Amino acid sequence: MQGTVVPSFIMIKKDNIQEIIDLSLRGTDIFLVELTLNNQNCIEVYIDSDQGVTIEQCMTLSRQIEGSLNRDEDDFELNVSSAGITTPFKIKRQYVKNLNKEVEVLLKNGIKKIGTLVEVTDNGFTLRTEKLVKLEGNKKKTKVTENLPVSFDDTKSTKLVFSF
């Protein structure tokens, strides 16, 4: 068709963005939680750190990523933000960061558990839960603490619990 300009899209590669992020975060306590890139070149980056993430840290990483990409070759949208305290955990390091904190775990079988995250391993984590149990010979129920091992493979989602 005459007079019609068809844009030529050179797709940004996720591996290249991953490399930029890895270099940018090296030597800091900030870590990548999730990186997504869709076919419209919309880049979503979620980061976290043991101390929390500031707006300035998000802006710095955004500038470093944008400065490493060529807008003349690729049109893209870039969003960098913290993982958020209400979003489910995505990676093992978030579990480690939240040791000894209360979490809500939804298992793939639909069962929900609330307890304290007391241990993290390569394959899962241990949740310390409390429940009331009627012990033999007692009229009242007694609070019993148990450590429940949970596999990452059996976990649908885990997130922090906040009590006000």
Image (cartoon, rainbow, N blue to C red):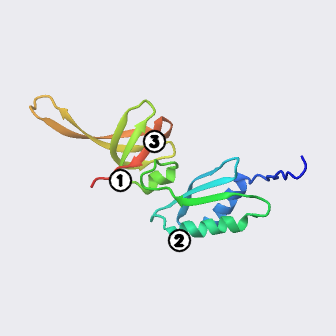
Instruction: Look at 47% across and 38% down and name the residue there.
Output: 156
Considering depth in this image, is 128 or 4 the residue closer to the camera?
4
Q: Earlier in the sequence, mark 2 or mark 1?
A: 2
Above or below, 74 against 146 in this view is below
| Apparent side of residue 25 relative to residue 82 in the rendered image (left or right) | right
Residue picked out by circle 2: 56
Label 1 crowd bin: few (<14), some (14–19), many (20+), radius 10 Å: some
Spatial distance from mark 2 to mark 1, Cα to Cα? 26 Å
Q: Nearer the viewer, mark 2 or mark 1?
A: 2
Quadrant position of the C terminus in the picture: bottom left
Instruction: Look at 48% across and 65% down and name the residue there.
Output: 53
Q: Are marks 2 and 3 in contact (CB under 8 Å)?
A: no
Instruction: Look at 51% across and 36% down and name the residue there.
Output: 153
Spatial distance from mark 2 to mark 3, Cα to Cα? 29 Å
Residue 26 visible in this rendered orientation of the protein: no
Residue picked out by circle 1: 101
Q: What is the x, y in percent for residue 150?
A: 42, 39
Residue 48 visible in this rendered orientation of the protein: yes
Q: What is the x, y in percent for residue 52?
A: 45, 64
Above or below, 160 against 65 in this view is above
**Amino acid type of the residue that numbered disc 1 sits on in the rendered structure:** Lys
**Amino acid type of the residue that numbered disc 2 sits on in the rendered structure:** Glu
Q: Earlier in the sequence, mark 1 or mark 3?
A: 1
Residue 77, quarter of the rendered image: bottom right
Q: Are marks 1 and 3 in contact (CB under 8 Å)?
A: no
| Disc 1 element | loop
Q: Nearer the viewer, mark 2 or mark 3?
A: 2
| Disc 3 element | strand
Spatial distance from mark 1 to mark 3, Cα to Cα? 16 Å
Residue picked out by circle 3: 157
Q: Earlier in the sequence, mark 2 or mark 3?
A: 2
Q: What is the x, y in percent for residue 140?
A: 11, 34
